[in-house]
Image (tube, helix red, strand yellow):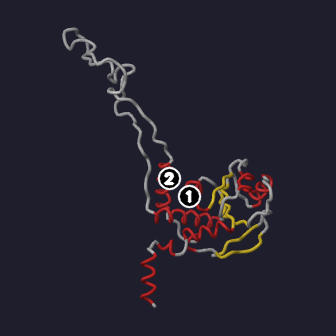
Amino acid sequence: MKLQVIDFAGQPTQEIEVDDAVFGIEPNEPVVHQTLLAQLASRRAGTHNTKSRGQVAGSSRKIRRQKGLGMSRQGNIRGPQHRGGGVIFGPTPRDYTQRLPKRMRRLAIRSVLSARAADGRLKVVEGHSLEAPSTKAVVGLLQAAQAGKSALLVTGAKDQVLLKSARNIDGASMVTADTLNVADMLAHHTLVLTVDAVRRAEALWGGERASGRPRTAMALEAGAEA
């Protein structure tokens, strides 16, 4: 498939051929949903903690004798029914990380990219010629690209000039193609990729990587056909 490339003024300049395996597949929504949940779960710190009755400070002496007073039976002051006592079945530190197979993560990224391209919410821009940071130039680009309330700028490599130009824009974020992920893409209305980012995405998730088969298996099949 082909994608339209625009300049920083929003004017079309050319069309580039892109890998259908990255930008033209049928989105797999269940995989996207599972990948998003796993990524959000992995961001949780998991540092919540409560003390049980064996961890709180206090005497272990029985408050009063068991029988003969006409009152309720009580143990020590560290019981959960007392003020300052321990917590029953309270949260403790844990790791929320969920591991996913590489094939699922790659499929989820390709599904979101394809869905954005089909909806017209994926814009490709030529490399900028900014010699110094310019927030005004990036704002003009996002307006010309009809990025909506939020946009995710994706570059092929780290770009400090563009990063400094976009970091003060409300609703705009910037990542490199290597760190592109499902949560960031779904959190923004529009994806704005440079041509270098498109080629880097194809190198990361296209070609033989999109097939999900090991390289050795593909080589054996190619040798058998020959």
| Above or below 136: residue 16 | below
Q: Amino acid at mark 1?
A: Asn
Is 27 displayed left or right of 76 in the figure?
right
Q: Amino acid at mark 2?
A: Gln
Distance Cα–Cα, label 1 vs label 2: 9 Å
Q: Residue furthest top?
A: 69
Q: Residue at x 59, y 64 (%)?
A: 113
Q: Residue furthest bottom?
A: 226
Residue 149 x %, y %: 69, 51
Disc marking residue 39? 2
Q: Residue at x 46, y 56 (%)?
A: 34
Is 130 displayed left or right of 48 in the figure?
right
Which image quarter: residue 81?
A: top left
Q: Residue at x 72, y 65 (%)?
A: 125
- The residue under label 1 is 181
- In the rendered picture of this protein, how many numbered marks are placed on residues? 2
Q: Residue at x 73, y 59 (%)?
A: 146
Q: Secondary structure at mark 2?
A: helix
| Above or below 115: residue 36 | above
Name the one closer to the observer, 47 or 24: 47
Residue 84 x %, y %: 39, 21
| Above or below 106: residue 37 | above
Quadrant that contains the N terminus:
bottom right
Q: Secondary structure at mark 1?
A: loop
Marks 1 and 2: CB-CB under 8 Å?
A: yes
Which image quarter: residue 63?
A: top left
Residue 218 x %, y %: 45, 79
Is residue 128 in view? yes
Is residue 121 in view? no
Q: Which numbered disc flags the more N-terminal residue, 1 or 2?
A: 2
Residue 199 x %, y %: 63, 70
